[in-house]
Image: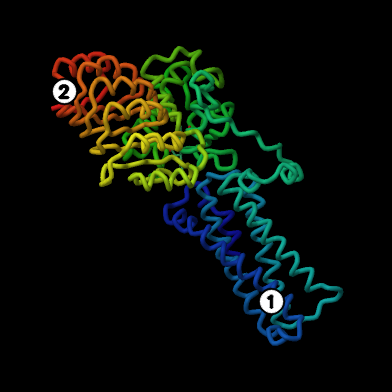
Amino acid sequence: MVLSILIDSGITDNPSDILIFFGRIHPLVVHFPIAFLLLAALAELISKRPKFQPLKNHTHYIWGLGCVSALFAIVFGYFLSLSGDYNENTIFWHKWSGIFLFFVSTIYYYISKKNIKLPFYGKQIVAFVTVITVFYTGHLGGNLTHGSTYLLEYAPNSIRLLAGMPEKTIPREKVTVLDSADVYLDIISPMMNRRCISCHNQDKKTGDLDVSSFINLMKGGESGDVIVKGDAEASDFYRRITLPESHKDFMPSEGKQPLTKNEVTLIGWWINNNAPPNGYFTQLNPDKNIIKVTKEYLGLDKNSLFSKKVNPPKKEAIDTLSNQGFILNMLMKDNYYLEANSSLSEKNITKNAIESLLQIKDQLIWLNLSHSNITDEHTEKIGQLENLIKLNLSRNNISDKGLIHLSSLQNLEALNLYETDVSDSLLTVIPKLKKLKRIYLSDSKATDSIVNQLKKGNEKLNIIFD
Ligand code: HEC
């Protein structure tokens, strides 16, 4: 037997590239015996019906295709197993049930071809055993590639309990304040789940490393500990994620999406702080830079407005605003945040029209009133549109008197005051806008001295002025 020769010969210790190459065709090839054998059993079943009677004389062809393709799957699967990256126990049962499948399907092929009569539902039993074996072998194969928890990961708890699995762990809530973030569970572990666990889990322990839990991670891999507590530079884990991507030891391997710069920084910091298995992030006394990196990583640097769901705007409000000269746009697919724009309208935007905007004040986050005859009289109402993130008031008659009313816009990130008459009041209003990132002041009444003072007050503020 080719098979036993292969199994017993010495090639297992040092498989050549060509064998592994063929081995990797296995996941493709396995679909053939699955499809053929299930089809064969189905054909057998329906050929009992008078209508499908003629099928009876041909089903053995499908059985034949099934057992030949099963043989190919076995041989390629054997090559794949030589790479040695899989759970040995699962692979043992997967291999032998695959071989068993080949034998039962061959037996069926034979009795079907020779039209042999078996006593007491003999044929049905063999067909049934074949089908069960197809599912069982396929399931184990799935476990080998995806990990044994893959299939039932999202199953209801009742089904999980039947299969002897623990109840679903409640996923950790999204961190909304940095103070509540757990250093391992919220920061380190999710990175590995995204980028490493597909190759380093309980069933597929590539390099003998399993990162699915803290305890297993600390057991290390083939070459011993991968994390040296307190010393990132000495940790193989850290070394591999900081190598040039082209290096053969770089992780994740095979060109998989690497960790981001922020993620690498956080892992290094975590290891240097003795790699604790849990505990509040803030208890490790992170410095300014680590806090910044962590906020970016957890998405806490973004405007918190976006994590809120808003109700759809009232239809009448939208119609009124359209009649008053506004063009309205939805800004997101799954939320009702809106943009209103009057910059291209021929109509004069009246005080009334601005008042109508208050009806969509929850939804309105971008407002473009450029060149719309806006005056200081309008700004009190504009100041009540508290969700505004971007506001364009350029090319309007707005002076210091009007600007004062805008200091209540605490979500504002961009403000355009190009070609307006604002000047000194900038110094009182702008420092109050804590989220402001960009301000346009070209062709306003602002002076170099005002701009310099604004810059001194907030180095990060991007001031466009020339
Ligand atoms: C596509 C599969 C794949 C992914 C994804 C992957 N690895 Fe690996 N890893 C391997 C293979 C294969 C080896 C064994 C060969 C070697 O040592 O380079 C290995 C070995 C290792 C080792 C050495 C274990 C030892 O003791 O020899 C470490 C550490 C490691 N990986 C870390 C990681 C980290 C961290 C990630 C996620 C950022 C990751 N790996 C993602 C395939 C992968």
Q: In the rendered view, would you say 24 is above or below 441? A: below
Q: Residue drawn at (27%, 20%), measured in percent from left and top?
A: 401
Within the displayed image, which quadrant is ligand 1 positioned in?
top left
Q: Residue drawn at (75%, 42%), measured in percent from left and top?
A: 161
User: Horizontally, is 70 left or right of 365 in the view?
Assistant: right
Q: Earlier in the sequence, mark 1 or mark 2?
A: 1
User: Horizontally, is 115 left or right of 420 in the view?
Assistant: right
Residue nearer the viewer, 408 or 219: 408
Quadrant in which residue 343 is drawn: top left
* Amino acid marked by disc 1: Ala
Q: Residue drawn at (34%, 46%), measured in percent from left and top?
A: 327
Residue nearer the viewer, 53 or 413: 413
Residue nearer the viewer, 267 or 173: 173
Q: Which of pointers 1 and 2 indicates the residue nearer the eye?
A: 2
Residue nearer the viewer, 155 or 355: 355
Residue 294 location in percent, x, y?
Answer: 42, 24
Q: Which mark is residue 43?
A: 1
* Amino acid marked by disc 2: Lys
Within 10 Å of disc 2 (Cα), the crowding (few <14, some 14-19, many 20+) is some
CA distance separating discs 1 and 2: 86 Å
Q: Secondary structure at mark 2?
A: loop
User: Horizontally, is 367 left or right of 117 in the view?
Assistant: left
Quadrant in which residue 325 is drawn: top left
Q: Which mark is residue 445?
A: 2
Quadrant containing the C terminus is top left
Residue 387 location in percent, x, y?
Answer: 42, 30
Quadrant containing the N terminus is bottom right
Q: In the rendered view, would you say 330 is above or below 463? A: below
Q: Is there CB contact under 8 Å for labels 1 and 2?
A: no
